Image (tube, rainbow, N blue to C red):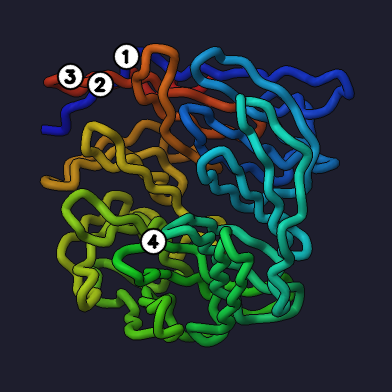
């Protein structure tokens, strides 16, 4: 049995405006472009791409927030006391220092180049930023960028899977595991070849393996594979359409799968699926942008958002009591689903989940 419990319905927050009057991020009435968030030392860093490139930092321990200006951040990753933002347009990577809980002015670290425009997927491993990107307007062929934070060395590998972009990244033992979307920049026609999972050897600087997932049961025409993450079981987990899967990283063979949402077909474009492992050992997944909690042993699951609702992003962070909670964005609102350990599952009615 899936052992977790939602303790009450979702709580929304309206993030405070700063003295300059920008970043009323989670309230009604703003032009919404895109959203993103990451975590750092218990903070949830919320970026909401409103008109003018406004954003906010939200602390789940105090429920307080502050606003800031940047650009349209497609991806965010935190490393120690630094936060890195991937900015559209132009594929620029910015660095912010948040030592002591205060944000420095954004510093341009580097430009990806190679006709890359949207840094949607960002991860950190072994001293390096790993970035998957969508190319510029009218172009096909995304890229994998590996940036050494200590030395500043940047390597950009474009078109690893022909004409595809990269929307999934995970790391293990010197190898990067990536997955692709068929979509390139705006005003392009997607290629006919299926999305794939691939393995990139950092030391050898080459792809050592790649494979489509057409062997997944019930998988029809599909646009992208995403959500890659290594579980406590050592398997490579991810999602495609409404299917969650786990692969053997040695040969990318399918070990587990479940079609949780069979109504989801040919889903997605650029925005990745967001999968996070909780301290309770459960997989918290934005599967087809539906908030889903999955037991990796039994593949039992619970859906926490209605089937007709699509959240943009989700993460896990600890509140003032040190309890992990679910945070996600609902258009321009930041939402939290409180959870506790339990021997039974108790969910409020769907009508109470969002307000």
Rendered position, 123 above or below 282 = below
Q: Nearer the viewer, mark 4 or mark 2?
A: 4
SS class of the residue under badge 2? Answer: strand
Instruction: Determine the CA span between mark 4 and mark 1.
Output: 32 Å
The tally of labels here is: 4
Q: Position of residue 287 (x, y in %)?
A: 39, 49
Identify the residue position indicated by label 2 in the image: 5
Identify the residue position indicated by label 3 in the image: 342
Asked if labels 3 and 2 touch by Cβ distance under 8 angstroms, the answer is: yes
SS class of the residue under badge 4? Answer: strand
Q: Position of residue 300 (x, y in %)?
A: 17, 41
| Residue at image point 28% right, 42% down | 283
Identify the residue position indicated by label 4 in the image: 170
Dot 3, how many residues are within 10 Å of its Cα: few (below 14), some (14-19), or many (20+)? few
Asked if labels 1 and 2 touch by Cβ distance under 8 angstroms, the answer is: yes
Which mark identifies residue 7?
A: 1
Rendered position, 338 above or below 77 = above
Rendered position, 234 above or below 331 = below
Position of residue 323 in the picture relative to residue 121 (left or right):
left
Of pointers 2 and 3, the one earlier in the residue sequence? 2
In the rendered image, the quadrant that contains the C terminus is: top right
Of pointers 4 and 2, the one earlier in the residue sequence? 2
Asked if labels 1 and 4 touch by Cβ distance under 8 angstroms, the answer is: no
Instruction: Determine the CA span between mark 4 and mark 2.
Output: 29 Å
Q: Nearer the viewer, mark 4 or mark 1?
A: 4
Of pointers 4 and 1, the one earlier in the residue sequence? 1
Instruction: Determine the CA span between mark 4 and mark 3.
Output: 30 Å
Dot 2, how many residues are within 10 Å of its Cα: few (below 14), some (14-19), or many (20+)? some
Q: Position of residue 6 (x, y in %)?
A: 31, 20
């Amino acid at each position: 049995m899936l052992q977790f419990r939602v303790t009450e319905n979702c709580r929304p927050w309206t993030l405070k405006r700063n003295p300059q009057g920008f970043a009323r991020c989670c309230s009604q009435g703003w032009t919404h472009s895109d959203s993103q968030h990451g975590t750092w030392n218990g903070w949830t860093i919320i970026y909401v791409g409103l008109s003018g490139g406004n954003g906010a930092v939200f602390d789940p321990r105090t429920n307080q927030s502050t606003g800031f200006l940047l650009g349209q951040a497609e991806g965010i990753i935190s490393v120690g006391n630094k936060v890195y933002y991937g900015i559209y347009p132009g594929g620029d990577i910015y660095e912010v220092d948040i030592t002591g809980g205060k944000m420095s002015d954004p510093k341009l670290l580097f430009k990806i180049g190679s006709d890359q425009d949207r840094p949607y997927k960002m991860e950190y491993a072994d001293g390096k930023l790993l970035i998957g990107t969508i190319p510029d307007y009218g172009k096909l062929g995304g890229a994998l960028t590996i940036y050494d934070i200590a030395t500043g060395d940047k390597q950009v590998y474009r078109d690893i899977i022909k004409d595809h972009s990269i929307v999934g990244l995970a790391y293990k033992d010197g190898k990067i595991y990536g997955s692709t979307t068929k979509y390139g920049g705006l005003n392009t026609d997607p290629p006919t070849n299926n999305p794939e999972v691939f393995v990139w050897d950092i030391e050898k600087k080459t792809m050592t393996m790649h494979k489509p997932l057409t062997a997944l049961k019930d998988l029809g025409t599909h646009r992208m594979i995403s959500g890659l993450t290594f579980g406590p079981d050592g398997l490579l987990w991810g999602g495609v359409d409404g299917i969650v899967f786990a692969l053997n990283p040695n040969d990318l063979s399918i070990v587990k799968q479940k079609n949780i949402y069979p109504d989801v077909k040919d889903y997605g474009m650029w925005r990745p699926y967001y999968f996070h492992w909780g301290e309770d050992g459960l997989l918290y997944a934005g599967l087809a942008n539906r908030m889903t909690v999955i037991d990796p042993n039994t593949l039992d699951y619970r859906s926490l958002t209605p089937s007709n609702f699509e959240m943009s992003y989700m993460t896990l962070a600890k509140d003032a009591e040190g309890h992990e909670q679910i945070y996600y964005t609902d258009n321009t609102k930041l939402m939290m689903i409180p959870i506790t350990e339990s021997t039974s599952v108790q969910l409020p009615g769907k009508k109470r989940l969002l307000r």
